[in-house]
Amino acid sequence: MKGKSQNKSRSDNISRTEKNGKGKNHQQWLMELRESEKLYRTVADFTYDWEYWLDRNGQLLYVSPSCERITGYKREEFIKKPSLVQEIIVAKDKGIWHEHRFSLEKKIESRDVQFRIHKRNGQICWIEHVCQPVINEKGSFFGFRVSNRDITERKQMEESLRISRSNLNRAQEVAHLGSWYLDLIKNELLWSDEIYRIFGVNLGSAMTYEKFLEIVHPEDREYVDDSWKAALDGKPYDIEHRIIVSGELKWVREKAEIEFNEEGKAVSGIGTVQDITDRKQAEEDSHRLREELMHVSRVAAMGELTAALAHELNQPLAAILSNAQAAQRFLMSEEPDLDEIREIISDIVKDDKRASEVIIRIRALLRRSDFEFTKLNINKVIEEVIPLVSSDSVIKNIALSTELDDKIPLISGDRIQLQQVILNLILNGFEAMMKVNVRSLCIHTTQNDQMFITVSVEDSGVGIEEKNQDHLFKPFFTTKKDGMGMGLAINGAIIEAHGGHLWAKNNPDQGATFCFTLPVCKEHSK
C-alpha cells in the first residue's frame, strides 16, 4: 500500500508538471528526453563525480564512468542492477536514504544528503548526494540528475578538526585559559568556550568590548581600558585585573596582539584570558604566612635578647631612681641648691628618653606590619639596632664595632624589616662565637657599584661547615639545637623583596661573613 501511495504521489507531481507544460504527448516527451540525455552524457562522461540520471518514473537511464573510481563497481553493473545504488549504502545510513527518496516523491525539488557506502573492496566511503530535478523551459519534468561526490577526505578532516577543537577546549578548561578575537571594525568579540565559563556568561552570547568591560571590577575598568587603548597604539598588552562573576571576585591575566592594516590602523585583536584566582589566593596566603613567620622571627630574636634588654632598661631606670632620691634630699635641706636640682631633673629626663627609646624600638620590631618602603640611610638603620644588642655584646664579652661608609647613598626599603635582618645576622654571629676565645663582630657598609650597596656582618666565630653551605638559606634547615630553621630563610625573602641578594662566605682566617645587597634609589644612581 505504501509503494502505491508513493507512486501515486509522484504521478500527481508529474501530471501537474505536464499540465504546466500544456500537455505534451508521450512521443514528443521522449524526443526531448533523449536530447537532454544526450547533452547530459556529453558532460557527465568527463566529470570527476559519479553522475547518474533517473527518469520521471525512477528508472535508471545513465551512469557516468566515475562510478567505478568512487565505488569500485562498473557502470554496467548499476545499469543491470539499479538496486545496487541502495544496496551499497551502509546499514545505519539507509534511513537517511529512505527519508530522502520519500521527500522527493512528495515534492519535486533540489535536495542533498550525506551518507556512507561500502565500496567493492570493503572500504567505507562518504558520499555527498545531490538530486537536481530536470525541467525544461516550459515546465515539463523529465526526471532527476544525480551527482555523487566522494567527500571521505573532507569528512576525515572535519573529524580531525572536531577532535582538535574538542582537545583544545578540554586543554583550555584544564588550564583555565581561553582565547578571543575582536573585530575592531565591526566591534564583534568572539570567545572560546572557556572564556564564557571564566566570565560566567552563557555560551554563544553575543559579546562586544563594552559588554566585556561591564564584567571588569569597577575599580579596574579605567586601568583595563587605558591598557587596551595603549595596545591600540602599539604598546604591549599583558595585564592582570579583577572581574565580578555572580557577585564573586575573580582574577584574570590577559595577553593580546593587535593587527594593523597597511595604513597603520588597528583592525583586530587576538589574545588569551587565564583565570589566575587560585594563584592570587595562594600568593595572598603565602604573603600572610610570610608576615606571620617574620613576626615570629622577630619575637624569637627579642626572646634571645631578654637579659640584655633588661639590662638596657635597668640602667636608665636605676639612674632615674638614684637622681630622684638625690633631688629629694636636696629639697629637704634648709637652702636647696636649685641649680643642682635642675641638673638632676635634666638627667632624669635624659634617662627617661633613653628608656623610652629602647621600648619604642622593641615595640616597632614586635609590631605586625606590611612592607612600607621609604627612603632610608642604611647606616642609620644599623645604628638604631646597635643599642638593642650592645648590652648583650658586653655580657658575652664580644667586641662590637661598625665600619660605615659615610657617603653611602640612600636606599628604598622597609625600616623594620631591614632592622630585623640586621638584628638576626648579629645574633647569629654572637652565637657562632660562643665556642671561641677571641670574639669580635663588625658591621660594614660599602657601595660596590653605582646600582647597589652592600651590608656585611663579619664575625670571628667557628665559620660555616662546607656540607652546610648549600643549605643555609633553605626553610627549616638549622644548626642550632633549638632552632626553627626559618631565620635565614626569612632574611633572604626580605632582602629579595627589596630587590637585593643575601649570601654567606667563610673568612680567610677565622669566622664567617654574611652579606646582602640593596638597590640604590634611582635618583642616587648614575
Image: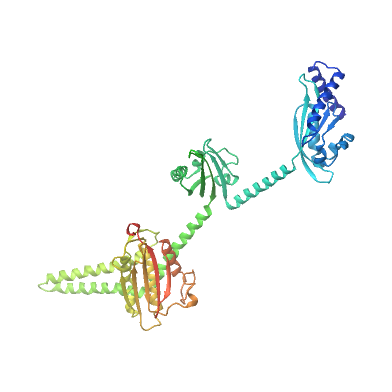
User: Please, which residue is most extreme toward the top here?
Assistant: 22
Quadrant into which the N terminus falls: top right
User: Can residue 417 be spotted in the picture?
Assistant: no
User: Please, which residue is most extreme toward the bottom here?
Assistant: 437
| Residue 473 position in % (x across, y down) | 46, 69
Horizontal relation, residue 205 to residue 229: left or right? right
Q: Which residue is painted at 58% across and 46% down in the image? A: 197
Quadrant into which the C terminus falls: bottom left
Q: Which residue is painted at 84% across and 37% down in the image? A: 86
Q: Is residue 522 above or below residue 107?
A: below
Q: Is residue 32 above or below residue 280?
A: above
Q: Nearer the viewer, residue 293 or 351?
A: 293
Q: Quadrant of residue 309?
A: bottom left
Q: Nearer the viewer, residue 58 or 287?
A: 58
Q: Quadrant of residue 310?
A: bottom left
Q: Is residue 173 above or below residue 264?
A: below
Horizontal relation, residue 148 to residue 367: left or right? right
Horizontal relation, residue 13 to residue 411: left or right? right
| Residue 48 position in % (x across, y down) | 77, 37
Q: Which residue is painted at 27% across and 74% down in the image? A: 315
Horizontal relation, residue 183 to residue 331: left or right? right
Q: Nearer the viewer, residue 475 or 484?
A: 475
Q: Nearer the viewer, residue 502 or 218?
A: 502
| Residue 444 position in % (x across, y down) | 34, 71
User: Please, which residue is most extreme toward the left here?
Assistant: 335
| Residue 418 position in % (x across, y down) | 37, 65
User: Can residue 253 be spotted in the picture?
Assistant: yes
